[in-house]
Amino acid sequence: MAFMISAENSNVRFWRHGDQSEFLNRLSLSEFQKLKGQDLVNEFKTFTRVQCDMHYCGNLDKETVAAKIRKDLVPEEITVASQTPIYRELQISNIPTVYFMDAPKSSQSIIAEYIPGKVDPDRDSRYTTSLFNNYFGESMSSILFQQIREFRSLAYSVNAKYSQPTYNHRDKKGQLVARLSTQCDKTTDAMEVLDSLVGQMPVEADRLETARQDVVNDANNQYPSFRERSSRIASFKKVGYEIDPNKELIEAVSDMKMTNIVDFYDRNIKGQPKTYIVVGNSKQIDMKKLAAFGKIVKVKPKEVFK
């Protein structure tokens, strides 16, 4: 089954968002199979009544473009306010918990560690997120990649990302999700190293400049082509920005020091409650050793995927 080897399909979202998980709110396979062509047409008509942005890139004058839009889409019928981007409330566990999904035919385990963070409303603290991510777990020069994969060969893949809610939801909490895939018999060994690095982040100042340059390169690479500019501007405005946040990001990280990363880690991650998600073959995993990470809650695919 696909979820056995896919880090994303280990469905961290289920434990992060509970019954608000998009995996539980979408149509099931049986519901899809019952759909008729007219059902899809009706659904499309529903979409066309929802608030939207319309973009055009070309040589036609604006009056001609507006006339074509009015002919085919009828803007007066757009009467439903858009609810995007939405924010799904984060689940918080008061005790360390390991959600375990048995995959009897799998030779690999998918492991995730989830930590709800704090609220970072001001822009500079939010921009520190990008520097922290590149330093700690999002690049091949990061702490996690080097310590878990390169130095110990405990993972096929490993990454960690602290995600902030969109800027218009800046009064909400962020979250850290660390993921790795490994052989089933190395599951608890990999978890021990991952947990130790997340629990006590190493401070290696010589990695700062590499992390900073990765942030700058990524921001520069996101500069849109001329066909994408209007939609990019609209998306920024929709979440509350008045200027390109990547421009501010580059300016902000240029002055950041190692203390910014450490302060961000101490505030959002260190000492926070942890939830673990493991998908793997229970016959090849030391389940007693796994229980040392927290209360084991066994789940079945039907509880996670609709």
Image (spheres, rainbow, N blue to C red):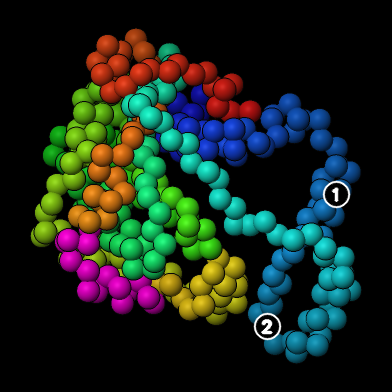
- Neighbor class of circle 2 (other Cα within 10 Å; few <14, some 14-19, many 20+) is few
Question: Is residue 71 placed above or below 97 in the rendered structure?
Answer: below
Q: Which is more toward the observer, 200 or 29? A: 200
SS of the residue under disc 2:
loop
- Neighbor class of circle 1 (other Cα within 10 Å; few <14, some 14-19, many 20+) is few
Inspect the magenta stretch and tell me whether residue 29 lies in it.
no
Question: Is residue 114 placed above or below 105 in the rendered structure?
Answer: below
- Residue found 43% across the figure and 18% down from its top: 297
Q: Is residue 206 left or right of residue 157?
A: left
On the image, the x and y values in percent for residue 111 come to: 35, 30
Q: Is residue 103 visible?
A: no
Name the amino acid type tagged 2. Gly
SS of the residue under disc 1:
helix
- Residue found 26% across the figure and 29% down from its top: 191
Q: Which residue is mark 1?
A: 41
On the image, the x and y values in percent for residue 233 come to: 56, 75
From mark 1 to mark 2, how far is it between C-alphas? Answer: 29 Å
Identify the image quadrant of residue 57. bottom right
Q: Is residue 178 left or right of residue 210?
A: right
Q: Which is more toward the observer, 55 or 51? A: 51
Name the amino acid type tagged 1. Val
Q: Main secondary structure of the magenta part?
A: helix
Q: Is residue 291 left or right of residue 148?
A: right
Q: Is residue 239 visible?
A: yes
Disc assigned to residue 58? 2
Q: Is residue 83 left or right of residue 19?
A: right
State which tag comes first along the sequence, 1 or 2. 1
Q: Start and end of the magenta stretch?
A: 247-261
Inspect the magenta stretch and tell me whether residue 256 lies in it.
yes
On the image, the x and y values in percent for residue 14 come to: 52, 33
Question: Is residue 210 placed above or below 202 in the rendered structure?
Answer: below
- Residue found 67% across the figure and 37% down from its top: 26
